[in-house]
Image (cartoon, helix red, strand yellow):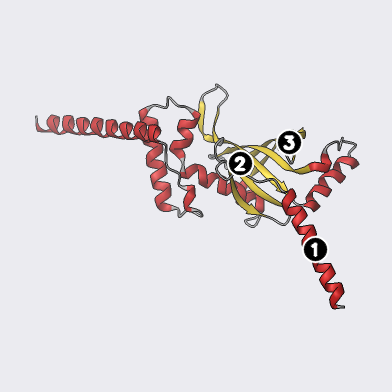
Amino acid sequence: MKKSVVILFAILCTLWTAVASASPQMDESIFKWVQSSARCDYFFNMQQICYGKDDKGNIDFNKLVVPVIKIYDYLMIDDVVSKRRWNGNSVEGFSDLVGAAEYYEINLQDMTVYFKQQDFLDSTFTALAGNRPDRTVKLDTLSEKSFDRMFYNRIIDYAMRNRVKLALRSNKNAENELLVKMQAEQDEYRAQNKATDSRDNEELNEEDAAKVKAAVEAQNKDNKKEKSKKVKKDDE
């Protein structure tokens, strides 16, 4: 009996090691891990998340565009392959399936998530096949325990903590007034909302930090001038 248990344990360890070694290594400087469910790990791309554009091509600071990656476990992989076979879709290359890249547009005003695209990935992160779900979800319709809702909320939280970085990423020539506004909103949000991970509060690079500092100083100087003019006018 003991021998059988030892053998079974060894087999399980071997299988676990094989699955673990097959999982792709994620670059933590690019992909932020958020959570793990029973079937997949959730990551979003910190270097590509940015603000979207409106119908006229202008930057819309209420719209987030974010690429994410989900790494599947073997049961999820089997489920995806089985469904593709059932629907008559090609499963070529799917023996190396590890997960999917998904693309969201999150409306910060309406609190909706537009599920724009999904690409199944192999272990080299090459797209095997794609589809366009063209689906919109309202966050308040999802259960508070929903993994998707928690994932979306963490993405939004990260974006609110880094408003200035995302603004400059979306538009390098952002005007001083906008940068000052974004900095104020970011500071207020950070003060009122404790970070789940202290690394969520990112620092700007030297060039961008200098640009924001100059914008704030210019704004303060303008405010002092306006205040001085008002005082002088009141004294007359």
210 or 158: nearer the eye? 210
Determine contact: label 3, label 1, CB under 8 Å: no
Residue density around tag 2, few if under 14, some if 14–19, many if 20 or more, within 10 Å: some
Residue density around tag 3, few if under 14, some if 14–19, many if 20 or more, within 10 Å: some
| Point 47% across, 52% down: residue | 198
Give the label, 2 or 1, closer to the camera: 1
| Point 48% across, 35% down: residue | 166
Q: Quadrant of the N terminus?
A: bottom right
Give the label, 2 or 3, closer to the camera: 3
- Element carrying mark 3: strand
Q: CA distance from mark 3 to mark 1?
A: 31 Å
**Residue at far top of view:** 56
Q: Amino acid at mark 2?
A: Thr
Q: CA distance from mark 2 to mark 3?
A: 21 Å
170 or 112: nearer the eye? 170
Q: Which residue is mark 2?
A: 112
- Element carrying mark 2: strand
Q: Position of residue 60 (x, y in %)?
A: 51, 30
| Point 61% across, 41% down: residue | 112
Using residue 186 as the reference point, say whether residue 48 is left or right of it. Answer: right
Mark with earlier residue (2, 1): 1
Give the label, 3 or 1, closer to the camera: 1
Mark with earlier residue (2, 3): 2
Using residue 27 as the reference point, say whether residue 225 is left or right of it. Answer: left
User: What is the quadrant of residue 155 in the picture?
Assistant: top right
User: What is the quadrant of residue 178 in the picture?
Assistant: top left
Q: Which residue is mark 1?
A: 12
- Element carrying mark 1: helix
Q: Quadrant of the C terminus?
A: top left
Q: Position of residue 148 (x, y in %)?
A: 66, 49
Query: In this view of the protein, can residue 198 be seen by the observer?
Result: yes
